[in-house]
Amino acid sequence: MIEERGEVARELMTQLIKGMGLKAELNVSIKGDAIYLDIKCEKEEILIGKRGRTLEALQFLLNRMVNKQLEEGVRVFIDINQYKEKRANSLTNMAVRLGERVKRGQKPLTLGPFNAHDRRIIHLALKEDPALTTESLGEGEMKRIRIVPKSQVR
């Protein structure tokens, strides 16, 4: 049954991509109750957008379309040319590098704004560091992150 849902997601995403005038190869995989679409595309920047915003919007839209057509809840995740993996590695490396700077200078550093997914990656990258703590600042979807030396935490 979940395989049928995967085919619905594939077909809807194919129509979206064709509507944008692009050609792409789609691979569907199922993990638990979630559907994962891996898309290979030459013009990835069109589908990804600035800092993955278009990719987030496409994923949101596809989730709405699939769930409306199936009339039941299923999660659909999209990745384009391994963008999410590359972004996670980049954010992790940045967090570690900036964490080292905070430890050397013993001064808090504020970054961002970031969406919830990116904030989570940064928090997890610094979670195990005994000398640092992180916190999210702000309201709404896009928040900043502050990296603080634990010596300054009250």
Image (spheres, helix red, strand yellow):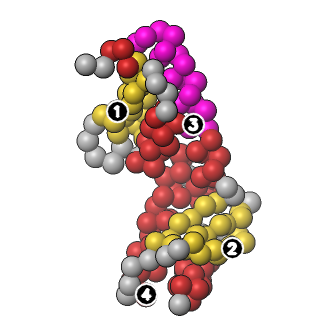
Amino acid type indicated by mark 1 = Glu
In magenta, the rendered stretch is 90-109
- The CA distance from mark 1 to mark 3 is 16 Å
- The CA distance from mark 3 to mark 4 is 37 Å
Q: Is residue 100 magenta?
A: yes
> Please, what secondary structure does the residue beneath circle 3 have?
helix
- The CA distance from mark 4 to mark 2 is 20 Å
Amino acid type indicated by mark 3 = Thr
Q: Of residues 42 and 73, which is closer to you in this image?
A: 73
Q: Main secondary structure of the magenta part?
A: helix
Check if mark 4's residue and mark 1's residue have beta carbons within 8 Å.
Answer: no
Q: Residue at x 45, y 49 (%)?
A: 117
> Please, what secondary structure does the residue beneath circle 2 have?
strand
Q: Quadrant of the C terminus?
A: top left
Q: Which residue is mark 1?
A: 135
Check if mark 3's residue and mark 4's residue have beta carbons within 8 Å.
Answer: no
The earlier-in-sequence mark between 1 and 3 is: 3
- The CA distance from mark 4 to mark 1 is 39 Å
For residue 45, side relative to residue 56 (left or right): right
Hey, which quadrant is residue 31 in on the image? bottom right
The earlier-in-sequence mark between 4 and 2 is: 2
Q: Which residue is mark 2?
A: 27
Q: Nearer the viewer, mark 2 or mark 1?
A: 1
- The CA distance from mark 2 to mark 1 is 37 Å
Amino acid type indicated by mark 4 = Gln
Q: Is residue 107 magenta?
A: yes
Can residue 112 be seen here? The reply is yes
For residue 150, side relative to residue 2 (left or right): left
Q: Which residue is mark 4?
A: 69
